[in-house]
Image (cartoon, grey):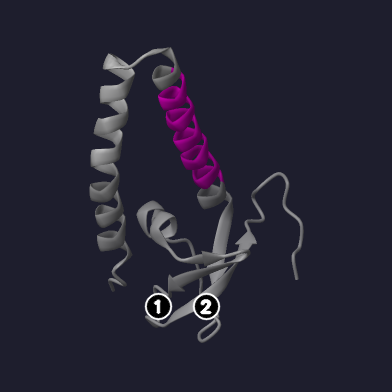
Amino acid sequence: MRDGSDLVFVFLLLLMAPLVLLMLFFFVTGDVLAKISTAIVFLALAAGIAVHVRIWRTYHYICPACSTSFKPTFTRSFAAVNCFELRGMTCTKCGRYDMMEALKDKSDPGWKNIR
């Protein structure tokens, strides 16, 4: 079942490609300030992706309709609409799209019972 998040992820990458190329151009040809600002932007992007990898590895979702616990793929998790603790996900069993709460896995060392 596809919910379109893979297409959203590809679309976001296509939007970011010209920005990345422009930043690389400034990094190679620009002055010191352009090089520093480009490096800061790349470090911020890398840190954001690293944080999301940590969240993706240690959280799962429970469908409110069928109570199935599931862990989405990285691209679906990355491209999902999120609002604080809620994230727009499509259930892998029943196919319902809903805002679901991210719950920590019990295997995570910092696990606490949220509910």
Q: Tell me the chief SS of the magenta region.
A: helix
Residue 79, given in percent of the width and then of the height, sits at 39, 58
Mark before the other along the chain sequence, 1 or 2: 2
Report the residue at 25% width, 56% height from top: 11
Residue 83, located in which quarter of the rendered image? bottom right
| Mark 2 element type | loop
| Residue corresponding to mark 1 | 93
Disc 1 versus disc 2: nearer the observer: 2
| Residue corresponding to mark 2 | 63
Q: Which residues are magenta?
A: 36-54
Note whether 28 is above or below 70 in the view shown: above
Determine if the magenta segment contains residue 96: no
> Does the residue at mark 1 contact the one at mark 2 (Cβ under 8 Å)?
yes
Quadrant where the image shows the C terminus:
bottom right
Residue 112, given in percent of the width and then of the height, sits at 76, 56
Indicate the amino acid at tag 1: Lys
Residue 1, given in percent of the width and then of the height, sits at 28, 74
Question: In this image, 20 relative to 109: left or right?
Answer: left
Q: CA distance from mark 1 to mark 2?
A: 9 Å
Question: In this image, 11 relative to 84: left or right?
Answer: left
* Residue positioned most to the top: 32
| Mark 1 element type | loop
For label 2, the crowd category at 10 Å Cα-Cα, with few meaning under 14, some 14 to 19 and many 20 or more, is: many
Report the residue at 62% width, 64% height from top: 84
Determine if the magenta segment contains residue 38: yes
Note whether 106 is above or below 16 in the view shown: below
So how many labels did they put on this image? 2
